[in-house]
Image (cartoon, rainbow, N blue to C red):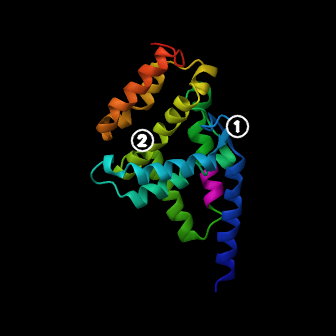
């Protein structure tokens, strides 16, 4: 057994435990508290398993699940940037790239390269797997907002056009789900959970 390798792997695992303390703006469906990055990542990985029949034809569900689990690890250091925070997005890429450099360096070299490649793939959103993972990532907060009477949208005065723009990858890559998306947004506007365009 390579003790140094094992120690690096376990150190990375424990560093990733910090995801359980990174809170997002979205409430849990039961409205008891805000969800954590770890809960969000688990949820979208589960969604990928459930929604694979709607995924882009070339998508590999197992790899997509890996992308889902890795995609927000950098927020351990970079923090969560709210999807509709224009100011926060100005330096998001730089903060997250620096965090990726720092975090994945904890791993043995081969795993560092593999984890970083998965994170980069998700961020680039070019492969069918990354597109599928991004679709799940964007759909999950909508489901949570619908379950919580638009809590996050109302609190931050989010407009329908902003949500629609974030959901465009679903329209383009998973068109069977687009009518559901537009129906939810219609309901949210009618319920005054989203500001009409």
Identify the disc placed on residue 102.
none
For the point 55% across and 20% down, the residue is 158
Q: Quadrant of the C terminus?
A: top left
Q: Position of residue 165 (x, y in %)?
A: 42, 27
Magenta stretch in the rendered image: 99-104
The residue singled out by tag 1 in the image is: 33
Label 1 to label 2, Cα distance in Å? 24 Å
For the point 32% across and 40% down, the residue is 174
Horizontal side, residue 87 vs residue 172: left or right? right
Q: Could you say whether the residue bearing mark 1 is in a helix, strand or loop? A: loop
In this view, the mark in front (1 or 2): 1
**Which of the 4 image quadrants contains residue 60?**
bottom left
The residue singled out by tag 2 in the image is: 135
Horizontal side, residue 178 vs residue 83: left or right? left
Q: Nearer the viewer, residue 147 or 5?
A: 147
Query: Is the residue 111 above or below the residue 3 in the image?
Result: above
Residue 117 visible here: yes
Q: Earlier in the sequence, mark 1 or mark 2?
A: 1
Crowding at dot 1, Cα within 10 Å, few <14 / some 14-19 / many 20+, comes out as: few
Residue pushed farthest front? 30
Q: Give the mark count.
A: 2
**Which of the 4 image quadrants contains residue 64?**
bottom left
Q: Is residue 52 magenta?
A: no
Query: Is the residue 40 above or below the residue 167 in the image?
Result: below
Q: Nearer the viewer, residue 129 or 153?
A: 153
């Amino acid at each position: 057994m390579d003790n140094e390798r094992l120690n690096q792997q376990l150190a990375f695992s424990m560093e990733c435990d910090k995801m359980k303390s990174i809170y997002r703006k979205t409430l849990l469906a039961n409205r008891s508290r805000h969800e954590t990055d770890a809960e969000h990542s688990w949820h979208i990985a589960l969604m990928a398993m459930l929604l694979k029949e709607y995924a882009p034809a070339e998508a590999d569900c197992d790899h997509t699940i890996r992308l889902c689990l890795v995609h927000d690890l950098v927020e351990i250091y970079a923090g969560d940037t709210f999807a509709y925070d224009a100011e926060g997005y100005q330096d998001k890429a730089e903060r997250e790239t620096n965090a990726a450099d720092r975090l994945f360096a904890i791993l043995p070299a081969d795993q560092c390269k593999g984890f970083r490649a998965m994170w980069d793939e998700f961020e680039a959103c070019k492969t069918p797997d990354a597109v599928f993972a991004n679709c799940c990532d964007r759909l999950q907060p909508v489901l949570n907002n619908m379950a919580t009477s638009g809590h996050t949208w109302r609190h931050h005065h989010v407009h329908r056009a902003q949500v629609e723009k974030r959901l465009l990858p679903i329209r383009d890559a998973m068109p069977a789900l687009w009518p559901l998306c537009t129906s939810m947004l219609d309901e949210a506007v009618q319920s005054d959970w989203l500001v009409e365009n």
